[in-house]
Image: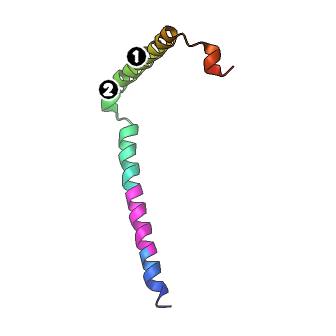
Amino acid sequence: MFTVYPTHFRCCAVYVFVSHRLFIVTNDLKSVVIPSAKVSKLLWRNFGMMAVAVVVLYVAAYLILRVLGINKRILAGI
């Protein structure tokens, strides 16, 4: 019985440490992902920039494929 106690204590300590770290990480992610009312303008600006980036990357990929002459059938594996 005395040999089980240190192992059990270590397992509990590791569990508490991991749980506490997970709690801290979850709180940090919550504060980043869920916006407050103050950052609404910033959120819309970021969304607009993301939409512009998607369009620019899509057009760039289209032009690169067009210049290289890669066909849609080649990309589809046909």
**Quarter-of-image position of residue 50:** top left
Res. 73 image quadrant: top right
Query: Which residue lies under the disc numbered 2?
Result: 42
Of helix, strand and loop, which one carries label 2?
Answer: helix
- Res 52 label: 1
Task: Identify which amino acid the numbered label 2 is placed on.
Answer: Leu
Left or right relative to 51: residue 40 = left
Kindly state the secondary structure of the residue where label 1 is placed.
helix
Point out the residue furthest to the right here: 78
The magenta stretch spans which residues?
A: 11-22
Residue occupying the point 61% across, 14% down: 72
Residue 23 got which mark?
A: none
Q: Is residue 72 magenta?
A: no
Query: In the figure, residue 11 lies in which quadrant?
Result: bottom left
Q: Mark 2 or 1 closer to N-term?
A: 2
What is the crowding at mark 2: few (fewer than 14 residues within 10 Å), some, or many (at least 20)? few
Q: Position of residue 57 (x, y in %)?
A: 43, 18
Locate residue 40, reporting x and y percent: 35, 27
Task: Reply yes or no: does residue 17 show up in magenta.
Answer: yes
Q: Which residue type carries mark 1? A: Val
Image: 51 above or below 22: above
Q: Position of residue 35 (x, y in %)?
A: 37, 35
Q: Which SS type dominates the magenta stretch?
A: helix
CB atoms of marks 2 and 1 within 8 Å: no
Q: Nearer the viewer, residue 28 or 61?
A: 61
The residue sitting at 30% across, 31% down in the picture is 38
Q: Residue furthest bottom?
A: 1
